Image (cartoon, helix red, strand yellow):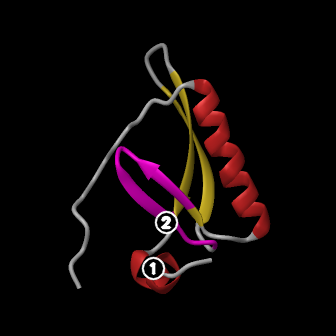
Amino acid sequence: MSHPAVRDIDKIYPRQEFVAKLRRLADALEAGKRFEISIDGEKIRVPAGAVASIEHERGEGEEEIEFQLRWNREIAGDESASGD
């Protein structure tokens, strides 16, 4: 099985689109369902068992909060490839 290429995308969305994506994510997490999102033309399937975390960074005159979801592709492979 081939592995996807390494990818690091930082995509800026208009506020209303970002809020809509967060709402869909919150609904999926609350329902214990897989979450699908298209980022820069690639469809990403986040399994229901993904681990959620919040990261805060502070640097030279800037602060950043990142909402992160992590999962192991090998373990979640069946769920990521199948329907809900």
Tell which of 54 and 47 is nearer to you. 47
- Please say if 29 is above or below 53: below
What is the quadrant of residue 2 in the picture? bottom left
The dot on residue 45 is: 2
What is the quadrant of residue 63 in the picture? top right
Quick check: marks 1 and 2 in contact, CB under 8 Å? yes
Q: Residue, x 28% and y 53% (percent of image)? A: 7
Q: Which residues are magenta?
A: 36-48
- The amino acid type of the residue labelled 2 equals Arg
Classed neighbour count for the residue bearing mark 2: other residues with Cα under 10 Å, few (<14), some (14–19), many (≥20): some
Q: Residue, x 45% and y 51% (percent of image)? A: 38
Q: Secondary structure at mark 2?
A: strand
Residue extending farthest to the top is: 61
- Coordinates of residue 47 in the picture (x, y in percent): 56, 72
The majority secondary structure of the magenta stretch comes to strand
Pick the quarter of the image with the N terminus: bottom left
- Coordinates of residue 75 in the picture (x, y in percent): 46, 84
- Coordinates of residue 62 in the picture (x, y in percent): 49, 18
- Please say if 27 is above or below 75: above
Classed neighbour count for the residue bearing mark 1: other residues with Cα under 10 Å, few (<14), some (14–19), many (≥20): few
Q: Residue, x 56% and y 79% (percent of image)? A: 83
Q: Tell me, yes or no, whether the highlighted magenta stretch contains residue 39.
A: yes
Q: Residue, x 62% and y 77% (percent of image)? A: 84
Q: Name the residue that disc number 1 marks.
A: 81
> Relative to residue 16, is residue 42 drawn left or right?
left
The dot on residue 43 is: none
Tell which of 19 and 9 is nearer to you. 19
- Coordinates of residue 42 in the picture (x, y in percent): 36, 54
First in sequence: mark 1 or mark 2? 2
Query: Residues under labels 1 and 2: Cα distance?
Result: 8 Å
- The amino acid type of the residue labelled 1 equals Ala
- Please say if 10 is above or below 63: below
